Image (tube, rainbow, N blue to C red):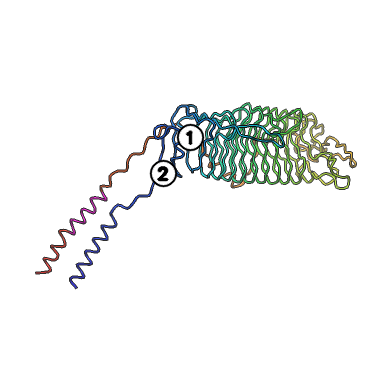
């Protein structure tokens, strides 16, 4: 029994010793500094592991001639200062084709082939080509880019970049964000989004000659507070904002000297936009159950055009643009305020109680309720395929609607994305991490226990003998 107790005491002490002995440490993410640790960015990428950060110091970092920078690790690539940290890339020329036309064009200067890659804080220059990303969770944040960005995946964030002429952003996938980017003197630049549950917010495009400067092809997207100036081809009536499919929200955007918003689809909400000096401010080409509410439509050739005299639809079936509702809009000084090819089905120019404000309305309001006593007649739609009808706003407003006070309720997923937008990176100079401190506590503890065992056990056995 005495020997058993002694062995038990020894085992307890040994167990305590094993608990405090240092255990093998798991490898942590590290920061690699260019050009301190590696002379080039590609060498640093090749040496990195998933989760590492590559910090690039100020200066111009030349890429190799006729090579693409390939990022195949889930890493963060961060420049010290966006204005002073430059990547000058030289991708190769490769055979390309458009339909049957073959030509030589530049390959991608940067190719991302995995998920969870972030590039931030660089001025990136290239002779041609654009960044391509295939993977989820890509982040291109706070850069000055002389190229386009094309991303295919989910949860991508293209935020806070300044882009030059002939560059643009094209994304495909779901739950992506394109926000607070500026495309200056855009040439044929555009922002294009294919997919669902994407947020396009706070972007600015100036001087784009692209037919669709903001092109949305998908459902349940939010296009919010973007600014387009001198965009689209007004003479041809090409719309800079082109939205297809259903359930999209197009709200609080401002279009100046640009052709307007063009809808092909159903159940979209177009609300609180300001459109000035365009060819056609609002147009529903095909679709039903769309709502146009509280838009400010000023000095355009056409204020609103609902449907069209469709040569591809027979007299019996009629146009497919029906059951759309327009109310609380301000139609001011447009060459033609509104036209509705409403010779089959019904479009509504009021919500049953209130309609729109028309600057050329001549009726009175003798009961002083803010609603005109007589309806407002829209421009007559002359159709070659059926008897013409003339739509009307039954409850025209006597004063313009207060657009700035309009609240747009965004879906929860979009509101969540808005509140979690990343900020462009600040200027920073990270240093090499300090070495791990020597684990004195872990060393002292085993020594103390060893001393206790070494002294205590002989005393214990000595007393047992007596």
Question: Is 10 in the magenta?
Answer: no
**Apparent side of residue 31 relative to residue 109 in the rendered image (left or right):** left
Dividing the picture into quadrants, the one containing residue 457 is bottom left
Asked if one can make out residue 140 in the rendered structure from this viewpoint, the answer is: yes
**Apparent side of residue 251 relative to residue 14 in the rendered image (left or right):** right
Residue placed at 45% from the left, 33% from the top?
Answer: 40
Give percent across and percent down for residue 128: 59, 30
Where is mark 1, residue-wise? Answer: 425
SS at mark 2? loop
* Residue range corresponding to the magenta coloring: 441-453
Dividing the picture into quadrants, the one containing residue 358 is top right
Where is mark 2, residue-wise? Answer: 29
User: Could you say which is closer to the camera, residue 260 or residue 26?
Assistant: 26
SS at mark 1? loop
Give percent across and percent down for residue 277: 72, 28
Give percent across and percent down for residue 179: 58, 37
User: Could you say which is closer to the camera, residue 404 or residue 81?
Assistant: 81
Residue 219, relative to residue 211: is it above or below? below
- Mark sitting earlier along the chain (1/2): 2
Residue placed at 29% from the left, 57% from the top?
Answer: 19
Give percent across and percent down for residue 296: 71, 33
Nearer mark to the viewer, of 1 and 2? 2
Do residues under tags 1 and 2 come within 8 Å of each other at their CB atoms? no
**Apparent side of residue 6 relative to residue 358 in the rendered image (left or right):** left
Dividing the picture into quadrants, the one containing residue 372 is top right
User: Could you say which is closer to the camera, residue 123 or residue 202?
Assistant: 123
């Amino acid at each position: 029994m005495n020997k058993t107790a002694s062995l038990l005491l020894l085992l307890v002490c040994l167990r305590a010793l094993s608990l405090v002995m240092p255990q093998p440490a798991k490898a942590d993410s590290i920061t690699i500094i260019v050009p301190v640790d590696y002379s080039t960015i590609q060498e640093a990428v090749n040496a990195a592991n998933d989760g590492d950060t590559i910090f690039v110091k100020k200066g111009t970092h030349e890429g190799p001639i006729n090579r693409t920078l390939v990022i195949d690790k889930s890493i963060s690539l961060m420049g010290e200062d966006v204005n002073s940290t430059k990547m000058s890339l030289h991708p190769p020329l490769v055979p390309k084709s458009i339909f049957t036309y073959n030509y030589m064009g530049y390959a991608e200067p940067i190719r991302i082939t995995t998920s969870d890659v972030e590039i931030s804080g660089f001025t990136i220059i290239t002779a041609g080509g654009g960044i391509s990303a295939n993977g989820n969770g890509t982040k291109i944040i706070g850069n000055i880019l002389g190229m386009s960005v094309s991303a295919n995946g989910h949860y991508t964030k293209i935020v806070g970049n300044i882009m030059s002429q002939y560059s643009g952003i094209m994304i495909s996938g779901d739950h992506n964000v394109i926000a607070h980017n500026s495309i200056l003197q855009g040439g044929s630049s555009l922002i294009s989004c294919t997919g669902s549950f994407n947020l396009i917010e706070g972007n600015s495009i100036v001087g784009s000659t692209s037919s669709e400067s903001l092109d949305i092809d998908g459902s349940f997207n939010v296009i919010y507070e973007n600014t387009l100036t001198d965009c689209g081809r007004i003479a041809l009536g090409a719309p800079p904002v082109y939205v297809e499919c259903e359930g999209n929200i197009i709200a609080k955007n401002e279009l100046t000297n640009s052709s307007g918003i063009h809808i092909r689809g159903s159940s979209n909400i177009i609300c609180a936009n300001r459109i000035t000096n365009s060819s056609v401010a609002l147009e529903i080409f095909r679709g039903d159950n769309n709502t146009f509410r509280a838009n400010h439509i000023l000095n355009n050739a056409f204020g609103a055009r609902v449907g069209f005299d469709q040569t591809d639809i027979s007299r019996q079936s009629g146009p497919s643009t029906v059951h759309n509702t327009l109310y609380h809009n301000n139609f001011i000084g447009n060459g033609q305020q509104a036209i509705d090819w409403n010779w089959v089905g019904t479009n509504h120019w009021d919500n049953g109680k209130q309609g729109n404000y028309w600057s050329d309305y001549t009726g009175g309001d003798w009961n002083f309720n803010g609603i005109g006593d007589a309806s407002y007649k829209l421009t007559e739609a002359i159709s070659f395929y059926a008897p013409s009808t003339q739509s009307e706003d039954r409850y025209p407003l006597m004063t313009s609607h207060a657009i700035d006070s309009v609240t747009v309720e965004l879906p929860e997923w979009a509101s969540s994305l808005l509140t979690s937008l990343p900020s462009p990176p600040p200027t920073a100079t990270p240093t090499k991490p300090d070495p791990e401190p020597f684990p004195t506590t872990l060393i002292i503890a085993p020594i103390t226990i060893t001393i206790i065992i070494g002294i205590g056990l002989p005393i214990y056995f000595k007393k047992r003998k007596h």
